Amino acid sequence: LLAMSSTSGDSSAIPAPVKWAQRNDKLYLTICLEDVQNKQLDLTSNRLTFTGVGGTDRKPHSTVIDFYAEVNPDESLQMANDREIVMSIRKKEPGPYWPRLTADKVKRHWIKTDFNRWVDEDEGPGGDEDGGGFGANDNQLESMLAQMGGGFGGAGGGAGGMDFLKGDEEDFDLGDGEGLEADGPDGNGKKDGEDEEIPPLE
């Protein structure tokens, strides 16, 4: 039994690129896919499921992520624009950082660390207050998600009908995370940020 599937349904679908960061009480996930159509996004206590057609090649994408630990869908937020889907997913139990995003240890090239949003565990919350990365600290990002986005809507598919494509995102740069040369939180000099185990912080 696989703990995580890269595709579901249409065998021609490919995984959508995913970036992630975390705090003690939440995850920040971004699905990096442009101009998504036929969007379906569902969050349960242990799984995120996404399907949609998008990208410059207009191909079908399908992604299933089984989380390392449980999350709380009722206290999670998401929004979409014409570049990406941004999510703040509340952990069910706040505590130490997860060693990885997924339930298993298999590395997937399409899951990368979001260096723009990452804050080391011993630095505490706050994010980027000077306008870099997402252009906001954690509180500003949460406020934007609450105002422009919404919850996941239970089993109905969540973001399928939610399109926040014009206007505010031009004044609130979500960033694309490309071209980053940071060593990343694992301290191993890996700039691709693949979903790797994170060693305990001293």
Image (tube, grey):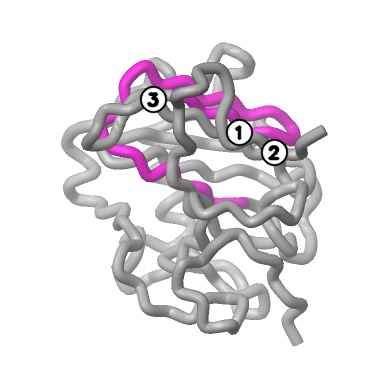
Q: Is residue 92 magenta?
A: no
Residue at x 38%, y 25% (from the top left corner): 60
**What residue is pinned by disc 3?**
60
Q: Is residue 40 magenta?
A: yes
* Front-lying residue, 82 or 169: 82
Q: Is residue 199 above or below residue 53?
A: below
Q: Are marks 2 and 1 in contact (CB under 8 Å)?
A: yes
Q: Is residue 179 above or below residue 49?
A: below
Q: Point out residue 136 in the picture as x, y percentages from the top left corner.
A: 36, 61
Range of residues picked out in magenta = 27-51
For residue 111, side relative to residue 200 (left or right): left
| Amino acid on which the number 3 mark rests in the picture | Pro
In 3D space, how far apart are the residues under numbered discs 3 and 2 (Cα atoms)?
Answer: 19 Å
**What residue is pinned by disc 1?**
64
Q: Point out residue 83 in the picture as x, y percentages from the top left corner.
A: 28, 41
**What residue is pinned by disc 2?**
4
Q: Are marks 1 and 3 in contact (CB under 8 Å)?
A: no
Please state which of the two labelled residues, at mark 1 or mark 3, is closer to the viewer. Answer: 3
| Amino acid on which the number 2 mark rests in the picture | Met
Mark 3, Cα crowd under 10 Å, few <14 / some 14-19 / many 20+, is: many
